[in-house]
Amino acid sequence: MKVRWGPQHPVSGQWSFFLDVDADVVVGMEPDVGYTHRGIEKVAENRTYIQDVPIVERACIFDAGNFVFGYVEAVEELMGIEVPERAKFIRVIVGEMSRIASHLYWLCLMSIAVGLETMLMWPVNDRELFLDLLEMLTGIRLTYSYFIPGGVRYDLPAGFREETERRMDYFERRLKDYYKMLYLNRTFQMRTKDVGVLKQADAIRMSVVGPNLRGSGVKIDVRKDEPYAAYDQIDFTVPTESEGDTYARSLVRFHEMEQSIFIIREALKKIPSGQIRVNVSPSVPKGEVYSRVESARGELGYYIVSDGGNKPYRLKMSAPSFRSLLSLPQIMRGVPMADVPTLYMSLDLIPLDVDR
Amino acid sequence: MAAVGFLGLFLDFLFSMYFLELLLKVVVFPGLMFISLFAMVVIWFERKFLARIHLRIGPLHVGPMMGLFQPIADFLKVLGKEIIVPSNAHRTMYNLAPILVVTISGMGLAFIPFGPSPSVMSIKNWVIYYTPFNLLLILMFFTIRPLIAIGAGWASNSKFSTIGALRAAFQLLAYEVPLLISIASVIMLAGSFDLIQIVQSQSKVWFIILQPIGFLVFFVAMMAELGRRPFDLPHAEQEIVFGWPTEYTGIQFMCVMLAEYIDLCVGSLLITALFLGGWLGPAFIPPIAWFLLKSLIVTVVIIMGRGVFPRFRMDQLLDLGWTVLIPLALIQVLVVLALAQFAPWILPNVTLGG
């Protein structure tokens, strides 16, 4: 039987799958992408570099911080400028808050995929902690366009450090609750352990990125391997799990949230005073650059070609969701139909990011 | 004045106490109004209670007690919705199924005695129709319901409905056998299929204490029977949209939902009657109030599952039913048999083996 999973299915998101189902077993799966294609890469060619900042963050608004992070890092590399130290630390803080907010959003989707509504509501509630902090810092909760080539737009507001500390303490307690509620839940373990195993060799072959790859036991993190901004001054660990199943991928994201808290605390401790921005010329010298950052969903690459004007000649994004999507048909082969939403959510795919 | 013949018999029946009593029972207490009130309060409670677990507020604005009338508002809204029949559906079966499912669920309620009086028709005895085999009849109506689900899923001619219907059938396989075996040990202890007898034989000690394993098996199987999380596979919203009633709209959808809550009511009344001593309790409140109070507590525990459990997968549910629940239920039967044979003084009112 052919089942069309989406785009009006409760958990499909803005795309659909063509599932080939034999009784209860999925024998084939084909993702049908393109529902949210907005031509972001083409739009970016027609706008100046500073105007492109709000455009690229709309590729994945759940993780807006890291998406702009990658873009400004690439543009700065093309310009050959060094941003002030303080701006680097502020960028790290915003990037990690964006990562936590994105992982919390994933956590609620994952929980609803296995049918646990409580853990749908709790992370959404606690995501507000970070959205409020980002609003305090940038004025906007979600699409904040806070990074610009040359630095960041505003300095840390008064009381930001104390407020962040307070919320981090609370959030750490909440993470323990999450662990008890979801990860130690026998039923959740039954539903996720040994389900959708992505072997290490397959994961590498299919160029899976981010927490999905680390869940298969590959220790790769751009923040560690090729440190950008202030990540080289912070000694954090990269959590990995070797099983490669849905539970391992979930656990990696959980531990990443703990590491993000650690990074934010360290960054707030080590942040120097000084400038937050250097002035840059609107035109970018001729050349091309490939720059990558670690977004919440994994490695995010920007390839920018400049012809010397104030608009990019070509902007190409290597989006993490698209790269992880390639492994979805592989892990969905031969599973019962009840596991389809679990597997889909376990890879943390966002259709916006796939289509761009 | 007096009419003769069939009409006379009919008029006599119409103005007899018997008919008025029946009418009162069907319309008011164990019947329609009670079940509507039960559904309203339970839906309200479920939403508020889960909202507290979720750190939300839940319904707030309609009626007193923070949104008590929200279910009524929802009902009125759904009442105004258009009834849509899919173009290639089997119209007769499709339209019949919601009526059947709510009727058959309600039929189970007609046989539950709400009080101790065993007389056939008395206003003190709140049962619509009394028969000594009422437990068997209630179980029969429980078992018929998935068949209607299968019919409705097939008649809808939609993929998700069909999958949901098949899941309802699978679920029947998983829970029906342990449910019946765990009831067998209760029947052996009480020596009767009559719920009144079963409750009266718990007058010294409740059956939950005499057979805790049987109670657990029955409770889990009943949760699967009612389709409450973690066993709400026939409806699994994230997987198959809404299962077999996916295509229903408006009042037909409301019938399906009402049937779910009637089943919840009958299920918790059964758990209370079989294991928790039914209407037995200290005399400061009437027996019927004890019965309703206990079953409301059971309902709350059943609802609680939605706050803490993810959903099982079908193979895991079948695994649970056949490799855990059935052996446990059989062990309980053996324990009861052994006790009756070797230590009959433990068991009150045992009729087993003479």
Image (cartoon, coloured by chain):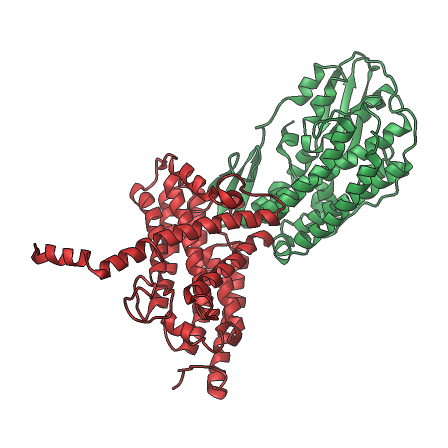
Chain colours: A green, B red
Instruction: Using the image as rendered, state which of residue B210 and residue B98 is in the foreground.
Output: B210
Front residue of this view, candidates B334 and B291 = B291
Whether residue A223 appears in this view of the structure is yes
Q: Is residue B184 left or right of residue A210?
A: left
Q: Quadrant of the C terminus of chain B?
A: bottom left
The image position of residue A103, as x and y in percent, is 70, 41
- Is A48 rendered above or below residue B127? above
Find residue A199 and report its horizontal and vertical position in percent.
69, 49
Mark yes or no: residue A66 visible. no
Q: Position of residue B30 (x, y in %)?
A: 36, 58
Front position in the image: B265 or A195: B265
Toward which corner of the image does residue A141 lie, by quadrant?
A: top right
Residue at 39% x, 59% y: name it: B142
Query: Residue lying farthest front?
Result: B284
Which residue is farthest top?
A309
The number of discs equals 0
Q: Position of residue B72 (x, y in %)?
A: 43, 42
Residue depicted at x 44% and y 63%: B289
Q: Relative to A153, is B88 on the left or the right? A: left
Residue at the spot x=45%, y=81% of the render? B348
Q: Quadrant of the N terminus of chain B?
A: bottom left
